[in-house]
Image (cartoon, rainbow, N blue to C red):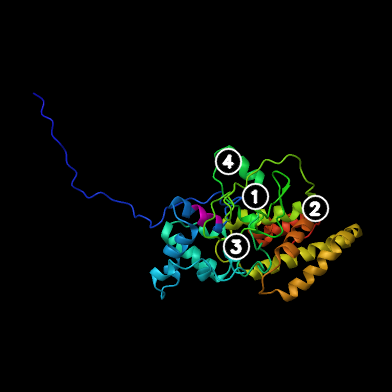
């Protein structure tokens, strides 16, 4: 007779730490189509079968407004935490409340990548006043396509920017009003399921035939997309003075290029004047993304990644090669 002995392992099981909220993965981090923080909050609320207002005011607000009664917070609307209607669009930006929201959300979800759904990493480097829309905007073709392909419906961070007026994929202008009720939709609403109107709850996706001419908008849209894509790679504290040194280098290269070939003068003269002014006034101040940084990259024939991620020596070699200069630093 064979005797089977049972082996008991009396060592306690190692149970991983649990998060208070679902550790929902944000969409497309590290790409030009990174999800926005506002979109993530709405999807997280849906995952918990809650309205966005109840999730924020019931779980997040008590950890920020620590001296207020939790039961009273639950009965208040989002404006109590986020401020007036003018402040809400900046939830995806770099304001103090955005930083607090991200800190608390990362604690509750045990995630480390939620700051990349905002421009927090660019605080002090990029000037944010007037950068964002006051209301939601969306590409109906994207949403309809994602729905048909059973993909996650979400709102890319780039759609929050005023200067992103078109979808580069479908060559369609972003929509800013619900086609069903005509409402302009707030960035944060009590209940705002992704892809649906927060007022009438109509589906906002739509297949549109034909394409619009978007070439004159392409540079800004691609530049903003590149900035969003490289955000996880820059670390947490970009230094404005380093950007200033790189912009001064670009100005030097432009001057040398004109000295070598006067045909560059007409193309570079305007941006060079802007660079001279910026280099003097912005030693420790943020720079305009659309008015300065993106046009400079275009004229210098470099990408946003090369401007911000390449070191000074690497950038100089790229610039010298782009303009056929035989210079050494």
Q: Position of residue 5 (x, y in %)?
A: 13, 34
Residue at left offset 70%, top offset 58%:
315
Looking at the image, is mark 1 or mark 2 earlier in the sequence? 1
Task: In the rendered structure, find residue 119 and report the number of the disc placed on it.
Answer: 3
119 within the magenta span = no
Looking at the image, is mark 4 or mark 2 earlier in the sequence? 4
Indicate left or right for 26 with 275 as reference.
left
Q: Nearer the viewer, mark 3 or mark 4?
A: 4
Q: Are marks 1 and 2 in contact (CB under 8 Å)?
A: no
Q: Residue furthest right?
A: 262
Give the labeled residue for mark 2: 216
Give the labeled residue for mark 4: 147
Q: Is residue 329 visible?
A: no
Q: Position of residue 319 (x, y in %)?
A: 75, 57
Q: CA distance from mark 3 to mark 1?
A: 32 Å
Quadrant occupied by the C terminus: bottom right
| Crowd band around label 4 with a 10 angstrom C-alpha radius: few (<14), some (14–19), many (20+) | some
- Which one is nearer the viewer's eye here, 68 or 14? 68
Q: Nearer the viewer, mark 4 or mark 2?
A: 4
Looking at the image, is mark 4 or mark 1 earlier in the sequence? 4
């Amino acid at each position: 007779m064979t005797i089977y002995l049972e082996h008991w392992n009396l060592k306690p099981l190692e149970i991983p730490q649990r998060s208070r909220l679902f550790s929902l993965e944000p969409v497309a981090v590290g790409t030009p189509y990174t999800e926005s923080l506002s979109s993530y909050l709405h999807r997280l609320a849906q995952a918990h079968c809650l309205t966005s207002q109840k999730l924020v005011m019931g779980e997040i607000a008590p950890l920020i407004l620590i001296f207020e009664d939790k039961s009273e917070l639950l009965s208040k609307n989002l404006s109590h935490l986020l401020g007036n209607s003018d402040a809400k669009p900046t939830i995806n930006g770099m304001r103090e409340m955005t930083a607090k929201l991200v800190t608390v959300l990362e604690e509750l979800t045990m995630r480390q990548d939620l700051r990349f759904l905002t421009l927090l990493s660019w605080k002090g480097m990029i000037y944010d006043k007037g950068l964002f829309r006051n209301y939601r905007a969306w590409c109906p073709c994207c949403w309809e396509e994602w729905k048909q392909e059973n993909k996650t419906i979400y709102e890319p961070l780039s759609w929050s920017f005023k200067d992103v007026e078109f979808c580069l994929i479908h060559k369609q202008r972003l929509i800013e009003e619900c086609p069903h009720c005509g409402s302009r939709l707030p960035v944060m609403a009590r209940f705002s399921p992704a892809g649906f109107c927060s007022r009438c709850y109509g589906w906002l996706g739509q297949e549109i035939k034909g394409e619009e001419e978007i070439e004159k908008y392409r540079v800004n849209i691609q530049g903003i997309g590149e900035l969003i894509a490289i955000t996880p790679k820059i670390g947490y504290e970009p230094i404005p003075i380093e950007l200033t040194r790189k912009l001064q280098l670009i100005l030097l290269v432009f001057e040398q290029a004109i000295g070598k070939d006067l045909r560059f003068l007409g193309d570079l003269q305007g941006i060079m004047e802007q660079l001279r002014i910026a280099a003097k006034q912005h030693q420790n101040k943020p720079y305009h993304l659309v008015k300065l940084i993106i046009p400079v990259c275009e004229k210098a024939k470099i990408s946003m990644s090369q401007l911000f991620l390449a070191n000074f020596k690497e950038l100089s070699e790229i610039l010298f090669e782009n303009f056929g200069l035989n210079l050494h630093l």
